[in-house]
Image (tube, rainbow, N blue to C red):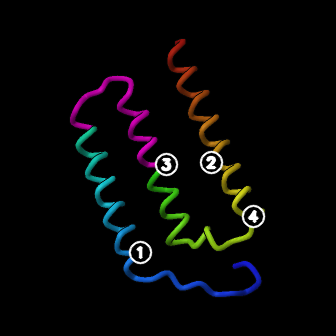
Amino acid sequence: MANNVSHITPYKILARVVLVLMFLTLLTVSISELHLGAFSVTVALLIAGVKGFMILTYFMHLKYESLLLRILVATIFVMYAVIVLITFIDYAYR
């Protein structure tokens, strides 16, 4: 943590985050049953990205870390998105 300061997130916020994560999980399951064709994987990955962001922010306390560490994590997400995009482009042109 930045400057060795501990941050305690209130239980009320953590409970809300857990509820949102459960809702997003149910949304992912319900969308998988809709058979959206090529968009099924895209929507599932978007929801998974939001869930990952919430976990990193609240449960791993990334919002209290230094700007450098946040930029590094954001860079990893961008690299992941580029790799997924390249994979989809490769799959589309086979």
Residue 90: x percent and y percent? 57, 20
Residue 43: x percent and y percent? 39, 36
Identify residue for label 2: 77
* Residue type at the position of mark 1: Ile
43 part of magenta stretch: yes
Residue 9: x percent and y percent? 50, 81
Going from N to C along the chain, the mark reached first, 1 or 2, is: 1
Q: What kind of secondary structure does the magenta stretch mostly adopt?
A: helix
Identify residue for label 3: 49
Identify residue for label 1: 13
Going from N to C along the chain, the mark reached first, 2 or 3, is: 3
Q: Classify mark 3: helix, strand or loop.
A: helix
Going from N to C along the chain, the mark reached first, 3 or 1, is: 1
* Residue type at the position of mark 3: Gly
Residue 72: x percent and y percent? 73, 56
Neighbor class of circle 4 (other Cα within 10 Å; few <14, some 14-19, many 20+) is few
Going from N to C along the chain, the mark reached first, 4 or 3, is: 3
Question: Which of the pair 5/94 is nearer the observer?
Answer: 5
Neighbor class of circle 2 (other Cα within 10 Å; few <14, some 14-19, many 20+) is some
Going by the picture, which residue comes out furthest to the top?
93
| Residue 24 shown left or right of residue 48 in the figure | left
* Residue type at the position of mark 4: Leu
Q: Can you tell which of label 2 and label 4 is closer to the viewer?
A: 4
Q: Can you tell which of label 1 and label 2 is closer to the viewer?
A: 1
Question: Which of the pair 34/8 is nearer the observer?
Answer: 8
Between marks 1 and 2, how big is the CA–CA gap? 24 Å
Residue range in magenta is 32-49
Q: Can you tell which of label 4 and label 3 is closer to the viewer?
A: 4
Residue at 21% over, 36% down:
33
Residue at 77% over, 83% down:
3
27 part of magenta stretch: no
